[in-house]
Image (cartoon, rainbow, N blue to C red):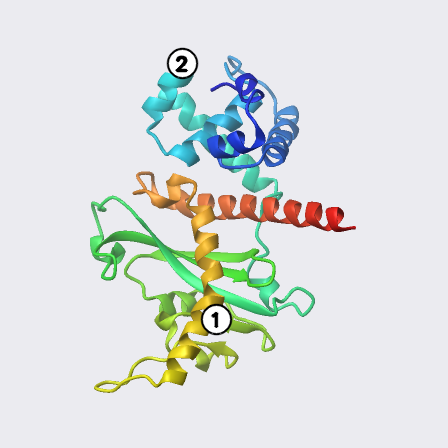
Amino acid sequence: MRYELTKKLSNRQFKRLVGVQRHTFDEMVKVLQDTASLKQTRGYPNKLGLEDQALVCLQYWREYRTYFHIASDWQISESTVCRIVHWVESTLISSRKFRLGGKKSLLISSQKPKTAVMDVTESQIERPKHGQKRFYSGKQKRHTLKSQLIIDLTTQEIRCIVNGSGRKHDYKLFVDSKVRFHSETESLEDSGYQGISKLHTNSHLPQKKPKGGKLTQGQKQSNRALASRRVAIEHVNRRLKVFRILSQRYRNRRKRFGLRCHLIAGIYNYELQKYSICLHLANQ
């Protein structure tokens, strides 16, 4: 579907088609236009306009079909689709318009979240030709890439993402990432982060059932209360995995996986901030 045809769609239909709101799409196109105006044009001009190039990239993320199928729909070559997707991704990430706060923002007093939630999600990959053990996840029973997300519980904003191989334990990934919380920040984790209290005393983990024993009724209620607070990060994971490039088996080179995770998370944050601004103006 070309950009001209998408104008006939409602805002809800457009969101379902490409995974982002219209105002977000317009901002992405504006970033591409600013970069294209500075770039010297050489060689044969691209058959697709900037709006259509942005649609190609979003279609690739949203549906995660092969370059061959997308190229057939747009009547261009597979190599052209590959170049368009890489150029759009590199341009958007370089613009710093869709960027995360980063792990440093967790330590700055003025930016620190009151409550942070941390969790790891895994994306399946194809079996590597070399070094298979490094990516084999015993929990998922397959080769995966891990993404450690940290969100602000109050705003639902993603603060930072750290990527790692599937074999690395969740707590080990946290330690190696050098991510640290402000002493006043309350952090909520699952049982995969046993030992985090040594690094951050204001952390909360579910209580494990003792060997050969049972949890008390109070401990069960405490675990349920913690799970009800932590469920927010599961909702964030679901919103990111609307783009099937993150939810289906990842077929591309692994070195670009982190860039795509950060970019999609940055777009999610951008839409969240725009929604908060609109909600604030509506309440005034």
Percent from the top left, x then y, of residue 91?
55, 35
Specify whether 183 is left or right of 123. Answer: right
Residue type beneath disc 2 = Gln
Q: Out of 283 and 117, give the one closest to the viewer.
A: 283
SS at circle 1: strand
Residue 213 location, quadrant: bottom left
222 w.r.t. 92: above or below: below
Residue, x 32% and y 66% (percent of image)? 169
Name, please, the residue furthest toward the right: 284
Percent from the top left, x then y, of residue 219?
39, 82
C-alpha distance separating marks 1 and 2: 49 Å
Residue topped by disc 1: 188
Name, please, the residue furthest toward the front: 217
Residue type beneath disc 1 = Leu
Residue, x 65% and y 67% (percent of image)? 108
SS at circle 2: loop
Residue, x 46% and y 47% (percent of image)? 240
Residue 260 location, quadrant: top left
Res 178 visible: no
Percent from the top left, x then y, of residue 284?
79, 50
Q: Residues within 10 Å of mark 1 (few under 14, many from 20)?
A: many
Residue 119 location, quadrant: bottom left
Residue topped by disc 2: 75
